[in-house]
Amino acid sequence: MDKELLVYIDGDFVEKSKAVVSVFDHGLLYGDGVFEGIRVYGGSVFRLVEHIERLYDSAKSIHLKVPLTKHEMSEAVLETLRKNHLKDAYVRLVVSRGPGDLGVDPALCKDPTIFIIAEPMTTVLGPREPRVVKVILASTRRDPVDAASHEIKSLNYLNSILAKIEANNAGVDDAILLDHRGFVSEATVSNIFIVKETKIATPSSSAGILHGITRGRIIRLCSDLGMDVDQRDVTPFELVTADEVFLVGTKSEILSVGTVAGTKIGNGGVGPLTKRLYQEFSKVVQRPEEGTSVYEAESVSV
């Protein structure tokens, strides 16, 4: 029988089947907390420093004091991977407000809850080409940027969940959410890029996007390859008439969009620019300087 994975909870490691949090935790009751999803490639945690920085920025934005330093949090992530002997994995790092009462007052939550889950996950990146997916345009909208900061990676993903339900009901892989103005925002858990006549564009902050770490690295990769990315408002018309559309995210990596709301994008397969970026990004994630080693004695500077 395989050994059960261990989960980090508030400084302790417990078996997955015994990993529990309080039913009074405001992360459960109200989605009051922040999180990060992180990839590990060949024993190296991809962009760990950026993930930790974003976690603490998100926590600061909701007035949540994290009881660990950034260095301690990074070490907790690495130790969770070591305890489970993982080299290729997906890590979910969560900081919730912690247990309180049945009201919404965060002042009554004395101790935040921290838990880290690491599970095996092999990459699909490689020399070939990405998976092709079908998407719809969801009726569910992203919240306006003046309602709540879209740059906070919070535990509340209700908009994305409702959009994913729409995708499931339509029998497709994912859904694209528009903002309150009708411009393209993002997919349920991925950022989106379009290509038209070799010109690349991606929705900007005004569309209420989360500034994904993979998105940022893809933009820099494009620059390294001599290609500019226009960060601007993108219309649904531009989306369905694009030559190529692709999604990027920590867990999904890079996905090619074959159809949007039943409309074929390009030839319905993988476009040349998407394929090139997929192959180049496959090399990026393997570079030692892109990550933090799990098993070598290194200092994590954050």
Image (cartoon, rainbow, N blue to C red):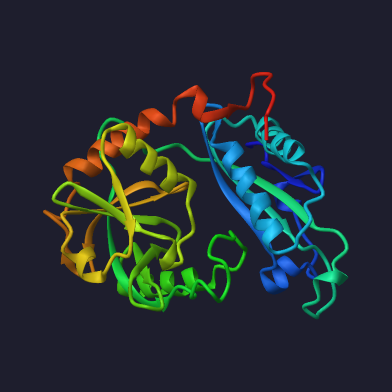
Residue 82 against residue 4 in the figure, above or below: above
Task: Say which residue appears at 58% left-offset and 59% top-offset.
Answer: 153
Query: Quick one: quadrant of the N terminus?
Result: top right
Q: Give the left or right position of residue 156, taking residue 27 as reference.
A: left
Q: Position of residue 280 (x, y in %)?
A: 31, 32
Q: Give the left or right position of residue 103, taking residue 172 as reference.
A: right
Residue 182: which quarter of the image? bottom left
Task: Say which residue appears at 60% left-offset and 68% top-offset.
Answer: 156
Query: Quick one: quadrant of the C terminus?
Result: top right
Q: Give the left or right position of residue 233, taking residue 79 as reference.
A: left
Viewer-nearest residue: 148 or 262 = 148
Residue 162 against residue 92 in the figure, above or below: below
Is residue 173 among what the camera can see? yes
Is residue 261 among what the camera can see? no
Q: Position of residue 222 (x, y in %)?
A: 31, 39
Task: Say which residue appears at 30% left-offset and 47% top-offset.
Answer: 229
Q: Position of residue 167 (x, y in %)?
A: 36, 70
Task: Say which residue appears at 68% left-offset and 38% top-offset.
Answer: 77
- Residue at the far top in the pictured view: 297
Residue 134 against residue 125 in the figure, above or below: below
